[in-house]
Structures are given as C-alpha cells and as structure tokens.
Amino acid sequence: MLRPMNPELREIPWDRVIAAASPAVANALEKSLAGGDLGFEEGMTLASVEGNDLLALAKVADELRRRTVGDRITYVVNRNLNFTNICIVGCSFCGFSRGPDSPDAYFHSTDALLAKSLEAVERGATEVCIQGGLPKDLDGYYYVQLVRAIKARLPELHVHAYSPMEITYGIEKTRMPLSEYLLMLKQAGLNSIPGTAAEILDDSVRRSLSPNKLKVRQWIEVIKTAHSLGIPSTSTIMYGHTERPEHWVRHLLLLREIQKETGGFTEFVPLGFIHSQTKLFQIGGARAGHSPDEDIIVHALARVLLHGYIPNIQVSWVKLGYEQSLACLEAGANDFGGTLMEESISKAAGANFGEYVSPGEFRALIRTIGRIPAERSTTYKIRKTFEFPDAEETMPSSRMPMLGATTSHAPVSASGY
Ligand code: SF4
C-alpha cells in the first residue's frame, strides 16, 4: 500500500519520481504539469497505476495541488441535517434508508431542525448541509418551507441543501419547471446544492445500482440549471463497488466538461463505497468497498484530470478514516470537509464515537503532515488561517468515524456539501 504519509516519501521531489515511472505514465503526468488537458486514454493510463507509477501519480497530483491552492488544508464548520431516513427509491448500495414502518424510521420536525441549526451556529457553524430520504408522501414544497424556516431565524447561515435527486423529486411532486423550482429555492435562501446522487455518471452502472434513481441526463440538467441561476454545487463520485477505472475517467471528464461550460462546481468529493450493511454487497453484487490504493488513485486522478478547472478536491473523512484521509491529502486533495457536528446524537445514543471532528482536531491532524490549517466558508472563502498551533488543537482520541451506512447523498457524506 502506498503511504505518502511516510516522511521519506514526502521529501522525494516529483521530478525524481517521474523519472522512475513508466514512459506512458511519465508522459501523461508531464503533460498535466505543463498545463495540458488529459484525454480518456491518458486518464486510463493513470487510473490503473501501481508501484512506482502510483507514487508518481500521487506526487504529481500533490504538486498540482500546491501550484493551484498552496499548502493550506481547509475545512468548514458545519452541521449535517438529515431530516428523514424514510425513502422509496431503494438504491442497492444504501445502508441508510428505511421503510416508513421501520422501528428506527424518523422524520424530524421543522422545529427540531431549527433547534439543531441554532445549536450549530452557537458552536461556530457557518453552514448546514440538508439532505434526506425521499418519503412517498412528501409535500413537494417541503424543501422550500424548510429553507424559509431556517433562513427566517438564521439569515447568515449558509444553506447547502438537496441533491439533484431531491430537486427532481420536488419537481415531480409540484409539477413546476426545473428552473422555476430552483429559483423558488434560491429566493427562499438556498445558497448551494450538493452534487451528490451522482454515484457513477453512467446509465448502465446506475441501472444496476439503482434503477429508480435519476438518469445521467437529469443529473446534468439539474446541475447546469442550478449553476446558470447562480447556485453553485459540489461534485462527487461513489467508487469501490461495481465500477471500473474507465468509469472514473469518463465521470471526471464529464464533470470537467460541465465545469468548462458553467464554472459552478466548488469542489470534487470522492466518496468511497462502504459495503458492509448494503444489499448490493450482501447479494454478492459488489466488491468489498474501496481499497487504500483506490483511494489514492481516485483522489490523485481527480486532481490531475480536473487541473485548471475544479481547484478543490475534498476528502470524506467519514468514509476514509483519518489516516487514509491524510494520505489522500498528500496525493492531490486539499480540503478536509466539514465537522458535521452530530456528536451529541451519537453520544446520547451511547456510541463511543460520532460523526464529528472538532475544528481543533482537524487542525491537529493537518499539522501531522506539515500543512497549514484554515477554516473556510462553503464557497472556499478563507475565514481564518491558523499559522501556529493553539490550545484547542488536540488529536482525536480513539474516536473514529462511523463507517457502515452508505449513501452518496445522505447521512455519512462527510463533505461540506
Ligand atoms: S441513496 Fe438516497 S435515494 Fe437512494 S435509497 Fe438511500 S436515501 Fe434513498
């Protein structure tokens, strides 16, 4: 397994590593360093690297990261609000959704979500990230009503909400045109949307994972329309299930084309598939999640293929754990995502760990790889750079992120999306 965290590897200059790589890999990486856009074949060359070639990919991705955004590693102080886990879509990779009669099904009230938002702001949050399941009887205007309720009390709080799947569901329920629906959300105070529910942007893969999910064409339409209305979004991929390297490359090149046209993506977030509690894995339909080498390749490949277009590559610490997140932050990524702030719930439920990293813990982790922590807004405006350690910086103890409830757009998605 590649470990860019090893201090000896960290010190090796990228040009020395390229010299040890195979000619095809070296050519592709040199082209990228010279500012060229890599095509499908070059992407495929990089997507299946190992050994010295993998090290070269990681080191060059790290160099491109340095040239693009410098040595700061950013994070956002945010809170996830998952208003319901009831969902009718039935994605086979999802370990989160429940039927309406399930004993652990929930639908939080607007008052409860407002209270969570207020608590988050008191604890320093600048963003709430709102996503949920799709219940059969959801009112198509629920999404806009929730944004209005939060914005009425907390007008400064950035509301990052609703995947393209949820937006599509809202349109279906209200029968409003897409642009009008998005405009209604924007006027209510929606600031940005998560580019989740992307999984793999290939209809044949999507059909096998989740035939009821929106199609590639619909995902693109929601994203492009949002961007055209001045609503930025993130972009994501879910990897480590049934897909192959060619799907990573096509997916990244598609995102690059959208970004060339709209400029509306703030970041790209690879989301490793957490397999254990999913139907897809249990019926033998997928491999056992993402491997450490895949993590490095996907993050580094994203940095290289999106270079010049999407400046921020985010790690999902909930999916990767801390050590592997740091490894990816040395292989092209530059953002640690959000605090998520669900600690109180998990602790109340008796868990040893929760969906929460404190800002001080983020900063302590970032310093272990010699980089500079900085808090950002959702749209990557730097709020504060922490040049020197402070008293709040402590390493996370034995708490590790909860792994096991996979969805690409709901509860354990660890980004600021
Ligand atoms: S991934 Fe989302 S849409 Fe699919 S079943 Fe889970 S909650 Fe529902």
Image (spheres, rainbow, N blue to C red):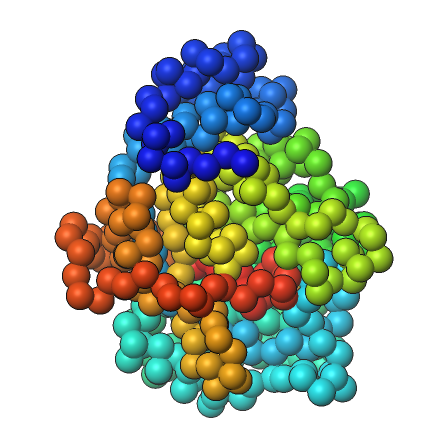
Q: Quadrant of the N terminus?
A: top right
Name above or below for residue 15 compared with residue 207.
above
Residue in the image at 47% along x and 72% along y? 353
Residue in the image at 56% along x and 78% along y? 83
Residue 304 percent location from the top left of the image: 47, 29
Quadrant hosting residue 328: top left
Residue 135 percent location from the top left of the image: 70, 77
Residue in the image at 66% along x and 70% along y? 96
Name above or below for residue 150 compared with residue 191.
below
Q: Is residue 242 left or right of residue 80?
A: right
Camera-side residue of 76 and 145: 76
Camera-side residue of 413 and 369: 369
Q: Is residue 412 left or right of residue 373?
A: right
Residue 290 percent location from the top left of the image: 62, 46
Residue 233 percent location from the top left of the image: 47, 53
Is residue 41 among the parts visible in the rendering? yes
**For the image shown, how many numbered marks are present on the structure?**
0
Is residue 302 among the parts visible in the rendering? no
Quadrant hosting residue 291: top right
Residue in the image at 54% along x and 88% along y? 109
